[in-house]
Image (spheres, helix red, strand yellow):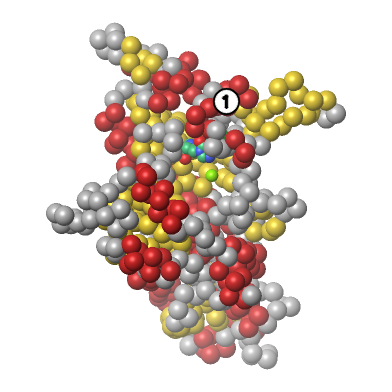
Amino acid sequence: RKTKTLENGTLRVFLVAKVVVNGEMIEYYDISGCYILRPWAMSIWEIMQTFFDAEIKKMKIKNCYFPLFVSSGVLQKEKDHIEGFAPEVAWVTKSGESELEMPIAIRPTSETVMYPYFSKWIRGHRDLPLRLNQWCNVVRWEFSNPTPFIRSREFLWQEGHTAFATKEEADTEVLEILELYRRIYEEFLAVPVIKGKKSEHEKFAGGLYTTTVEAFVPNTGRGVQGATSHCLGQNFAKMFEINFENEKGEKCMVWQNSWAYTTRTIGVMVMVHGDDKGLVLPPKVASVQVIVIPVPYKDANTQGIFDACAATVKTLNEAGFRAEADYRDNYSPGWKYSHWEMKGVPLRIEIGPKDLANNQVRAVRRDNSAKSDIQMASLVEGVKEMLDNVQQSLFDAAKQKRDACIQVVNTWEEFAEALGQKKMILAPWCDEEEVEKDVKARTKGEMGAAKSLCTPFDQPELPEGTLCFASGTPAKKWTYWGRSY
Ligand SMILES: O=C1CCCN[C@@H]1CCCn1cnc2cc(F)c(Cl)cc2c1=O
Ligand SMILES: [Mg+2]
């Protein structure tokens, strides 16, 4: 029974749930699949948002806000790609006691909300490029096991929607945005990702191609789509008649992109870095980077210890670090150590009588529990060095663990074995959609089927005559496969 529980979705959910509730990131809500984002999680979202918003503003992308509601006529406009999604659309059918004439959908994504207005606003080439972004929530009434951050019925995201005169401009922007997503994962969340292209089967059906940053969770052996940047081609331009008159007076359709990252990023970070003491926050996204804890000993100069704690917080705050002290007199230092470890604060500073006497502080890293004494005179340099080390070693450790999970295979037998060992599998593939569906069918089961995760831009050498691991026909590319969230 235990093993069974271990394998299926429940434990996966449980692991994340326990850590994010105990770490005070999430509170469960009385509607299934919906979660309360407490300040400890919201602050991480805000730190990433501050970075990403500033970067897209440098790219002359402007923020806007479109309505939450989509009329059913407009939503159904794009019937081919939504038919697969229809079951997850949430509808408003009443106001008070009275039925609405027409049911109104809550946006699951905003193409159909925005693009009729793109068509109205874009007339001539001088109206291009049109580059808009919105920070908002979306609702998708999913039925598979809901998990905080990873799969919820409402989540926060940014959705970028851009229109260009040429395909070249669109292609360029797709990769500029994808690089920002890589930076969010690798520079802020300390999570290694692989940049690549989604297969025809896995891409956004309404688009031309989908690029992605793929993360991997070694503990569960599952890949997770970290963020996506799609080139839509002219598909939506055709559907919504988004045309412009070019310099020669010819009527042309625009080339479009759309791109998003979501609060799922936080869940990936929690799963990659969390340990059995709870959350482990990378300093770049920690709302409290340093927690200062007074360790009074009987009546030995307690006021002096408290003053030293206050001075430490003040000095660190003035140097730009997010530091706080925990003066609560109803909790012991030991209780406080485990409390702040559970919340994942990257660095703890203890100040006791001995530290006071030696005019130093005792600093303890959350990631590896390493202790070091820092002279008060060099407090800022010492703390900066430790926090930078924590950030880098969290990334290095996650990359080392992720790389250890990557298995290169050439045959189906090797593939099946690696899948059983919860690996992220790099295999030569013939790039046939039928074969991809066949891999899914052949690996169906309790743990979920294997799927293609991405074809990495960084392609290893593919020797002439290499055969596809699944079909045995000539391989065209190396592709990552695995189970996923
Ligand atoms: O991933 C992004 C980046 C930001 C803007 N959107 C695209 C594509 C979204 C796909 N997608 C994803 N989920 C959906 C769920 C739905 F219920 C409906 Cl009606 C449509 C969709 C849907 O189109
Ligand atoms: Mg979905």
Disc 1 Cβ-to-ligand 1 distance below 8 Å: no
337 left or right of 187 in image? right
Residue 455 visible to the viewer? yes
Which residue carries the number 1 mark?
A: 76
Residue 215: image quadrant is bottom left
Judge whether residue 57 can be spotted in this image.
no
The quarter of the image that holds ligand 2 is top right
Vertically, is 77 above or below 331? Answer: above
Q: Is residue 136 above or below residue 352?
A: above
Residue 37, given in percent of the width and then of the height, sits at 63, 54
Residue for point 42% across, 71% down:
421
Q: How many marks?
A: 1
Q: Is residue 390 left or right of residue 69?
A: left
Q: Is residue 136 above or below residue 464?
A: above
| Residue ID at (47%, 46%) | 261
Quadrant containing the N terminus in the rendered view: bottom right
Number of other residues with Cα within 10 Å of mark 1, as a class: few under 14, some 14 to 19, many 20 or more:
some
- Three-letter residue code for mark 1: Gln
Residue lying farthest to the left in this orientation: 464
Q: Residue at x 45, y 21 (%)?
A: 239
Q: Position of residue 416 (x, y in %)?
A: 38, 65
Residue 163 coordinates in the image, percent (x, y): 38, 26
At mark 1, the secondary structure is: helix
What residue do we see at 57% from left, 25% from top? Answer: 76
* Position of 301 relative to 169 (above/below): below
User: Along the line of sight, which residue is nearer the eye, 380 or 148?
Assistant: 148
- Measuring from the top left, give residue 186's x and y in whole percent: 38, 58
What is the quadrant of residue 130 in the picture? Answer: top left
